[in-house]
């Protein structure tokens, strides 16, 4: 098993900052090489407020734009 260079706490803080800065979970998956589920779990563990599903083109958001 590969030992991470960063502590888990550092990784959680980094992931949270990037996600709250607008990065998607999929972008964090690509950057870290971890699974979608593990990134999602780590974000939840760090206390991150999760965004709703769908991204910028999600229909429920577009419906409110006039």
Image: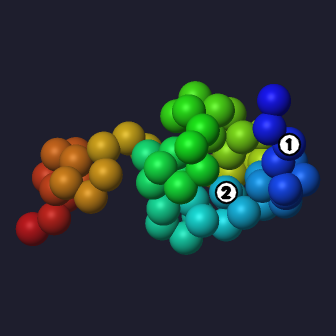
Dot label at residue 15: 2
Query: Can residue 9 be seen?
Result: no
Dot label at residue 3: 1
* Above or below for 59 versus 16: above
Q: Secondary structure at mark 2?
A: helix
Query: Residue at the spot x=27%, y=58% of the render?
Result: 56
* Image coordinates for residue 61, horizontal then vertical, percent: 24, 53
The residue lying toward the viewer, choosing from 55 and 66, is: 55
* Image coordinates for residue 23, horizontal then vertical, percent: 48, 62
Query: Residue at the spot x=85%, y=57% of the render?
Result: 6
Q: Name the residue at the front extreme.
A: 1
The quadrant holding residue 21 is bottom right
Q: Kindly check if marks 1 and 2 are in contact, taking CB atoms under 8 A apart as contact.
A: no
Dot label at residue 62: none
The residue lying toward the viewer, choosing from 38 and 17, is: 38
Badge 2 density bin: few <14, some 14–19, many ≥20, Cα 10 Å: many
| In the displayed structure image, the side of residue 62 where residue 6 appears, left or right | right
* Above or below for 66 versus 33: below
Query: Can residue 37 be seen?
Result: yes
* Image coordinates for residue 31, horizontal then vertical, percent: 53, 55
| In the displayed structure image, the side of residue 38 where residue 13 appears, left or right | right
Q: Quadrant of the C terminus?
A: bottom left
* Image coordinates for residue 47, horizontal then vertical, percent: 76, 48
The quadrant holding residue 41 is top right
The residue lying toward the viewer, choosing from 18 and 53, is: 18
Query: Residue at the spot x=69%, y=51% of the render?
Result: 48
Mark closer to the chain start, 1 or 2: 1
Cα gap from disc 1 to disc 2, whole angstroms: 18 Å
The residue lying toward the viewer, choosing from 48 and 63, is: 48
């Amino acid at each position: 098993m590969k030992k991470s260079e960063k502590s888990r706490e550092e990784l959680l803080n980094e992931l949270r900052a990037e996600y709250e800065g607008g990065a998607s979970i999929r972008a964090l998956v690509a950057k870290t090489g971890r699974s979608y589920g593990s990134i999602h779990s780590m974000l939840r563990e760090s206390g991150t407020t999760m965004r709703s599903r769908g991204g910028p083109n999600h229909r429920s958001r577009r419906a409110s734009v006039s």
